[in-house]
Amino acid sequence: MTKRGGHVLIIDDEESMRHMLRLVLEREGYRIAEAAEGAAGLDILGQREFDLILCDIRMPVLDGRGFLGEAVRRQIPSTIIMMSAYGSIDTALECMKLGAYDYISKPFKPDEVVLTLRKAEERLRLQRENRYLKSELSRSSEEKKTIFKSTAMSRVLALAERVAEVSSPVLISGETGTGKELIARFLHSGGSRKVGPFVAVNCSAIAAGLMESELFGHARGAFSGADRENPGLFAAADGGILFLDEIGELPLELQPKLLRVLQEGEVRPVGHVHSRKIDVRVLAATARDLRKEVAEGRFREDLFYRLAVVEIEVPPLRDRADDIPLLAEYFLQRIALREKRSMPKLTSEVFHALQEYSWPGNVRELENLMEKTMIFCRGDKIDLASMSWEIRRRERITEKDLSLKKATSRLEREYIRKALEATGGNRTRAAELLEISLRGLMYKIKEYGFE
């Protein structure tokens, strides 16, 4: 098991509880400090920072609610998880609205505490990424033009700016890797809900049987394994935005329940008889053709039209070639800053080859290529020879390139070069990798001028 090393502050008036939590968490690699009530906890936080705080609700002097309110007022950056033996879903929701990340009902199992802390650590990681994305999205309009120069993307951003302030659902479509979540975050940062949470969930990453409770929450004991209240992702996004990525993967039986939430503005957790009002703007994204899914009975037509009040289609990278050189330099600069290295320059031949490539993986593939190129670059220039074979051979083939014989020769030459590089020039081993005879390899080496 991977050990964690975060700093955790435990605030609880029961010494036995603090002792138990210390033993469990130190065994997991956490570094622990303790306080017997909220005021003492605030004193400790005035001296040093903690990644995570576990705080009981019922305590003398300053109770958990008082501590939580003061911590939020002081803008203490720690992630706070509340604990209580007297809680309910109302208590959990109240604490989360006040600023807590999560809520654990006592008595709890040690594994439950560890799992909650690990989820909180993942949230901290995502928050750091989100802060970086927001800083990029809040750049000046002139800087944005240097990343999105093409007419196609200018239209997308103009539409996003127009609808950022409204609360209507938006359906963002486009191929995988085009940056649909970036557009969703653009809508969040540019609208009135930017002070509220942005909660993202990939519908294809959650098991169908768990999707309902993850989205809408569940009561304690609602089903096997539901040993505590879960307010759900809609409640977590209250006052902000819920981004449903890969909405086409949403199970058909769950689609009417999502439709009801969108129409009524309320959710009913699994196991509860009463619904709760929520104020959430829903943004959805898909790489599928949802109209085709509707026609074939895999997606509800009424839900489609409710989600697609506004449709934003993000064009594939191959259709906005003007953006490619700028994005390539942007990714190189970002990677160079992260690695504390000087940024190498791309040659004009590289720019041309990048614009000729079809980019099946879109912007994500371009970023991946720039990172790999940066890893192996040792000079101050990146030329065409440094690029992968797919980029050098170009996928936009003209009539002059349609000779199968010439294409086979180019492929053969490339594989022989890679085999010789992989074996450090050992021709016997290279022949084995290529599954040809040594004599055949020697002939090819001479034919292609490798000697």
Image: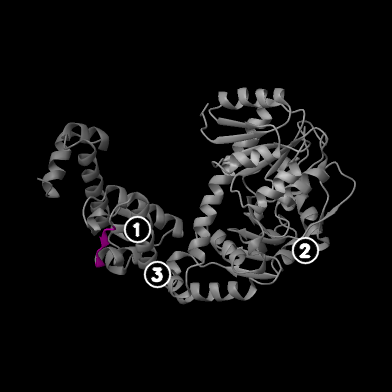
Q: CA distance from mark 2 to mark 3?
A: 36 Å
- At label 2, the amino acid type is Asp
The residue shown at (63%, 31%) is 34
Does the image show residue 370? no
- At label 1, the amino acid type is Leu
Q: Secondary structure at mark 3?
A: loop
In the rendered view, would you say 7 is above or below 77?
A: above
- At label 3, the amino acid type is Ala
Q: Which residue is mark 3?
A: 321
Q: Earlier in the sequence, mark 1 or mark 3?
A: 3
The residue shown at (67%, 71%) is 310
Q: Which residue is mark 2?
A: 302
Q: Single out the residue that lies furthest toward the right.
A: 273
Q: CA distance from mark 1 to mark 2?
A: 44 Å
Residues shaded magenta: 343-348
Q: Nearer the viewer, mark 1 or mark 3?
A: 1
Marks 1 and 2 close (CB-CB < 8 Å): no
Residue 166 image point, x, y percent: 69, 72
Q: Earlier in the sequence, mark 2 or mark 3?
A: 2
Q: Earlier in the sequence, mark 1 or mark 2?
A: 2
Rate crowding at label 2 as few (under 14), some (14 to 19) or many (20 or more) other CA atoms within 10 Å. Answer: few
Does the image show residue 71? yes
Rate crowding at label 1 as few (under 14), some (14 to 19) or many (20 or more) other CA atoms within 10 Å. Answer: many
In the rendered view, would you say 95 is above or below 310?
A: above
Q: Which residue is mark 1?
A: 332
Q: Position of 369 compared to 57: left or right? A: left
Residue 405 image point, x, y percent: 25, 56
Q: Give the tally of numbered discs.
A: 3
In the picture, residue 343 is in which quadrant?
A: bottom left
